[in-house]
Each structure stands twice: as structure tokens, then as C-alpha cells.
């Protein structure tokens, strides 16, 4: 598995396959995550999201495209130390964008819920679409009528 | 729901700073305060105003029903704010005993004609409770000086109860929201909100991403040359209508104060506070009127600009034909049409909400000089343009926006500026599985890590 977008932390790691190239809308995003065995007992639950968020000058907005919650307790308890795969069909918009004051970023985010209300977040970013980065506009004059 | 307390969470350039915990606790404290203040005020209002009013309008406790005769009226004059004289009505009544005798008269404390803003109301009430007329009343059998006319139920304390009630509701909602911050993650709350939005039957294409500006074919205006007429953004007409409304309201207020001040002057008792107010309001009124006249003067002869387009919404990389029509009666030194894309980001800085705008694409589509526009002979022109294939599509989220527009600018030989913007909806070129935003695939378990 070729992995470029990966975020390793002492607690867990999250990976996205083939993220060296931009994804196109409609592509299937594949990835996996796991909580490191030595911290698995500490994590109460984990939430995996595929989401976009805005960066830049404005206040942050975000939208969740894919969401899955895993709990270490209860009737649907899972073993968080096992590597888990996630897959989702990417939407048509919003496309990743690197503008002057507006930036749109996509990522897979793993949120771990730890004892005493603590949380830990690990992200792996990827690019959706091939929107060119914004550049200073130059006005090209047309022929005068 | 984001952190709303601007004192502890600030946006500085591209990053947020502040003390998240302090922001959380201060917001929770604010919500609890609202619940306490709203709840206490609501209880006081219920038990000290609403319940006594309700009882007084029915049979008062300890009182018995009887008949009273009005024996005298008086109209106390009360000084209101700014020297305006208030009107009121007080009634003196005698209870008529069973054998037809009149008991000693009593001035009724909670009179029927309680404070009234107009003299007409008092006169109406005085006519109903004319001297010598009999009315139903309530009396205290143990104290002959306690007498009350049956009062109609007052309506205004009931809507007033909405004020503490809304404070209480906002506080309760704030506490729930604050607790939600701790119990659930922002992603989970966003997902719930997104699902609710998709279920909204009022949203025309509920399966579409919420970040694409909403487009309704039903709201589209049809053109003459091409199927779609582009909507103008923030037309000058609206600005002028707003200015006219403000100027009118302001000057009506001014006229009222001039009237009050004149009355005071005629009585030989000038109210200096009113005079000072009249002068201040008058200066602002003059300034508003001057701006309105100037706006009219600058717009004279400039007609409407219409843009019609061959297709809408647009797609990245698509080519489109546009028909431009400029009406009015003027001579234009120049007129240009441009394709513009701009980013807008709004952010909280301290207690201010600021918006930063950056133009990221500007392309001149046409430039015409020395145009004469006559009544019934508009200037008309066709041109085409292509939306750059690698540009960003239209995007809108609560604090960030990427918007595409056609901008028409010009200058008349009288030096008047023409600046009009027409919004366009640019969609991403590829639409996989239209109507299907999310495809969930059950995750499979793999080998455990070492």
C-alpha cells in the first residue's frame, strides 16, 4: 500500500491510500487507522471522519462527509488496536482550494476520546480536484469596440 | 456550534487564539446567568402581575359584587418625558346598597382610566363612566373604603412575559449547547446538522452539497435573447430606496419634535432639551436630504443594465454567450464588462465582525467607448466568455465564500459612475452520481498492529 498522507502520533496512526495525486470527485477514498496497542486500553472511543474545512483569514467552517464512531465499551465494543479500513465515495464539491483569504482543505480525521475528558486528534490530508491556486489577477485589456 | 465568546476566542489573521477552557466556562456561566435572571423575572412577573391581574379581572378575593354610582371624575395632569403632558382619569364612586341608599363616596385607587397616552382615550373612558351612571363594582364588606370597579383584563402584561421567557429559553439552550460541546465532538454535531439539512423538504436539491450556492430554476428570470437574465447584486435602486425611507422617517420625527418645541414656546415655557434635540435632529435631517438629492442627481438619465446568458448555472471550463443591454438617456465615455471571481472571508475580531475580500480572477470581456444611449434606443451588445477550467467553483459556507460575477462599469460624459454586478453560479464540472453525496462502506477489520 503506497501511503503519502499519513499522520503518526504516539497514540495512533491514520493513512490514506494513493494520496500522492489529487483525487477526483467520484473517486473512492481508501484509508485505514489504528490506535497503538500500548494506548488502546486508554482510549474509550474513536471517531473517524472524512471532512472538509476552511482555513485562512475567515472563521473556520467545515462539513463532515463520512463519519464512523467506534467504542471500546458497550454492546458494540470493538478493539481499537486493530487496523480498520474506511472507504467512501468522494463528492463533487467543495474542491480543495488554496486561495488568498479562503482555503478549502480535505482530510481524514481521527478523534480519540481519552480518560478525564481529554481528546486527541490526528489528521491525514488529501486533495480533492485540481483547482489551481489563486494568483494575483492581471487585467488583460480587450480590443476597444 | 462555535465558541461565541469573543473575549476569549479571537481570530488573528489565519489562526485562532485564546483560552478555550475559559471561553467554555464563561459561556456556560453566561447561560446559567440568563436562566437564573430570566427564570426569576418570569416568576415575579407571573405572581406579581399576571396572576393579580387575572384575579382582578374576575372576582377579587374577599370582595363581593355590587352596584356603584359614579359621583365625580377628575383628570390628573402628569408631566411626561420631554415636557409632554400625560392624561389620566380617576373616578369617585359610591356603592348603592340593597335598599337604594348611597354610601360615602370613595376615590378609586386602581381607576378604570389608568394612565393614558392620549386625551381622546381619557375622554372616551370619561363618557363611559359619566357622573350619575351605575356600574358593576366590587366592595369589601369589612371595609367600606375598599371599592373597585371591575377592570377589563389588560393585554400588554402577557406579551411582556415573552422578555424573561426568551432570556430563560436562550439560557437553557446555551447550557444544552455547552454540555453538547463536552459530550459530543464537532464532527458528530456537524453530521447531525447536515443530515437534518438534507431532510429539509424546502431545500430544492437536498442531496446537493450545502456549500454550493442554492440555485432555484423557478426563481430565474427569463431573458429575451437568451434563456436566463442574471440577477443584479445590491442594486443602487435599493440603496436609494433605503436612503429615502430613512430620510422620510427621520424628518417625520424631526417634525414631531418641532411641533412639541413650538407648543412649549407658545406656552412661554420653552423646553431647552427639546430645542437642543431639534437642532441636532435637524442637522442630521438636512444631511440626509442633501445625500438623497445628490443620489438622485447622480442617477439621472442612467437607465437599467440587463445581462442575459445562454446557460445558468455555469460549469468550470464552459463557454457562454452574453447579451448586454443598457437603457437610459446619456452619453457614455466608456463601458466595460468583466468576469470577476472574488473570495470573501468573515471573521470575528474582538467584538467586531469583519469581512476580507480578495479578487482572484478579473478578465475584461468587452470595452466600448463613445456610446450614445437614447430613450427607446438602448445600447445592445453580444459577447462570449469562458469560465477558466482550473478555477474554483462557487462556494459558500457560513464564514467563507467564493463568488463569480459579471461586472459592468462605465462613466457618462457628466462624470456619473455606472457600476453594476451580476452574480453567477459556477458549478464543478464533474457531477458523479448526482443526488448521491455520501456512500458509506462498512469498514472491515484488518490485522492488528504489533
Image (cartoon, rainbow, N blue to C red):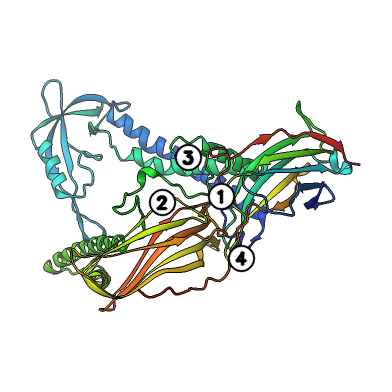
Q: Which mark is residue B12?
A: 4
- Asked whether, in this view, residue A56 is left or right of residue B61, the answer is right
Cα gap from disc 1 to disc 4, whole angstroms: 24 Å
Q: Which residue is mark 3?
A: B205
| Mark 2 vs 1, N-terminal side | 1
Label 3 vs label 1, nearer the camera: 3
Foreground residue among A90 and B178: A90
Are discs 4 and 3 both within one chain? Answer: yes
Q: Residue furthest left?
A: B132
Cα gap from disc 2 to disc 1, whole angstroms: 51 Å
Are discs 3 and 1 both within one chain? Answer: yes
Foreground residue among B391 and B202: B391
Q: Which mark is residue B375?
A: none
Label 1 vs label 4, nearer the camera: 4
In the rendered image, residue A128, in percent from the top left (x then y), is placed at 64, 51
Cα gap from disc 4 to disc 3, whole angstroms: 36 Å
Q: Residue furthest top?
A: B99
Q: Chain of mark 1?
A: B
- Looking at the rendered structure, the secondary structure element under dot 4 is strand
- Looking at the rendered structure, the secondary structure element under dot 3 is loop
Task: Name which quarter of the figure residue A37 lies in.
Answer: top right
Amino acid at each position: 500500500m503506497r501511503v503519502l498522507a499519513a499522520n503518526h502520533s504516539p497514540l495512533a496512526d491514520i493513512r490514506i491510500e494513493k494520496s500522492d495525486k489529487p483525487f477526483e470527485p467520484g473517486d473512492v477514498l481508501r484509508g485505514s487507522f489504528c490506535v497503538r496497542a500500548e494506548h488502546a486500553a486508554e482510549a474509550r472511543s474513536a471517531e473517524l471522519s472524512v471532512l472538509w474545512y476552511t482555513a485562512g483569514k475567515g472563521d473556520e467552517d467545515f462539513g463532515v462527509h463520512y463519519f464512523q464512531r467506534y467504542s471500546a465499551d458497550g454492546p458494540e465494543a470493538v478493539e481499537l488496536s486493530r487496523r480498520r479500513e474506511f472507504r467512501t465515495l468522494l463528492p463533487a464539491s467543495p474542491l480543495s482550494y488554496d486561495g488568498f483569504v479562503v482555503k478549502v482543505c480535505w482530510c481524514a480525521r481521527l478523534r480519540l476520546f481519552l480518560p478525564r475528558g481529554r481528546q486527541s486528534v490526528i489528521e491525514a490530508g488529501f486533495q480533492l480536484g485540481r483547482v489551481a491556486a489563486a494568483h494575483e489577477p492581471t487585467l488583460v485589456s480587450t480590443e476597444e469596440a | 456550534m462555535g465558541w461565541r465568546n469573543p473575549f476569549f476566542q479571537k481570530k488573528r489573521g489565519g489562526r485562532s487564539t485564546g483560552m478555550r477552557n475559559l471561553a467554555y466556562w464563561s459561556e456556560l456561566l453566561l447561560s446559567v446567568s440568563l436562566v437564573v435572571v430570566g427564570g426569576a423575572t418570569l416568576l415575579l412577573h407571573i405572581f406579581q402581575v399576571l396572576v393579580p391581574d387575572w384575579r382582578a379581572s374576575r372576582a377579587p378575593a374577599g370582595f363581593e359584587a355590587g352596584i356603584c354610582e359614579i359621583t365625580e371624575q377628575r383628570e390628573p395632569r402628569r408631566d411626561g418625558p420631554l415636557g409632554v403632558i400625560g392624561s389620566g382619569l380617576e373616578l369617585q364612586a359610591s356603592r348603592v346598597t340593597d335598599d337604594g341608599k348611597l354610601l360615602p363616596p370613595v376615590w378609586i385607587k386602581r381607576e378604570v382610566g389608568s394612565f393614558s397616552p392620549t386625551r381622546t382615550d381619557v375622554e372616551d373612558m370619561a363618557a363611559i363612566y359619566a357622573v350619575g351612571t351605575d356600574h358593576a363594582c366590587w366592595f369589601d364588606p369589612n371595609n367600606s373604603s375598599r371599592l373597585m370597579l371591575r377592570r377589563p383584563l389588560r393585554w400588554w402584561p402577557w406579551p411582556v412575559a415573552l422578555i424573561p421567557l426568551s432570556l430563560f429559553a436562550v439560557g437553557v439552550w446555551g447550557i444544552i449547547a455547552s454540555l453538547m460541546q463536552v459530550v459530543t465532538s464537532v464532527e458528530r454535531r456537524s453530521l447531525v446538522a447536515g443530515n437534518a439539512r438534507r431532510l429539509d423538504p424546502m431545500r430544492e436539491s437536498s442531496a446537493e452539497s450545502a456549500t454550493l450556492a442554492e440555485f432555484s430554476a423557478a426563481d430565474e428570470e427569463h431573458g429575451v435573447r437568451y434563456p436566463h437574465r442574471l440577477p443584479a447584486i445590491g442594486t443602487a435602486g435599493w440603496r436609494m430606496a433605503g436612503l429615502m425611507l430613512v430620510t422620510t422617517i427621520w424628518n417625520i420625527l424631526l417634525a414631531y419634535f418641532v411641533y412639541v418645541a413650538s407648543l412649549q414656546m407658545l406656552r412661554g415655557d420653552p423646553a431647552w432639551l427639546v430645542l437642543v434635540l431639534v437642532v441636532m435632529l435637524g442637522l442630521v435631517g438636512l444631511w440626509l436630504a442633501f445625500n438623497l438629492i445628490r443620489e438622485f442627481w447622480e442617477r439621472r438619465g442612467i437607465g437599467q443594465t440587463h445581462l442575459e446568458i445562454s446557460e445558468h448555472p455555469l460549469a468550470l471550463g464552459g463557454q457562454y454567450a452574453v447579451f448586454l443591454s443598457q437603457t437610459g438617456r446619456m452619453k457614455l465615455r466608456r463601458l466595460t464588462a468583466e468576469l470577476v471571481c472574488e473570495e470573501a472571508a468573515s471573521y470575528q475580531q474582538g467584538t467586531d465582525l469583519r469581512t476580507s475580500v480578495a479578487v482572484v480572477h478579473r478578465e475584461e470581456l468587452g470595452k466600448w467607448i463613445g456610446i450614445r444611449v437614447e430613450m427607446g434606443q438602448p445600447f445592445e451588445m453580444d459577447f462570449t466568455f469562458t469560465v477558466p477550467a482550473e478555477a474554483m467553483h462557487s462556494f459558500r459556507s457560513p464564514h467563507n465564500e467564493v463568488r463569480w460575477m459579471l461586472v459592468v462599469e462605465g462613466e457618462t460624459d457628466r462624470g456619473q459612475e455606472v457600476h453594476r454586478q451580476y452574480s453567477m453560479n459556477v458549478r464543478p464540472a464533474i457531477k458523479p452520481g448526482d443526488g448521491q453525496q455520501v456512500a458509506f462502506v462498512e469498514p472491515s477489520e484488518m490485522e492488528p498492529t504489533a
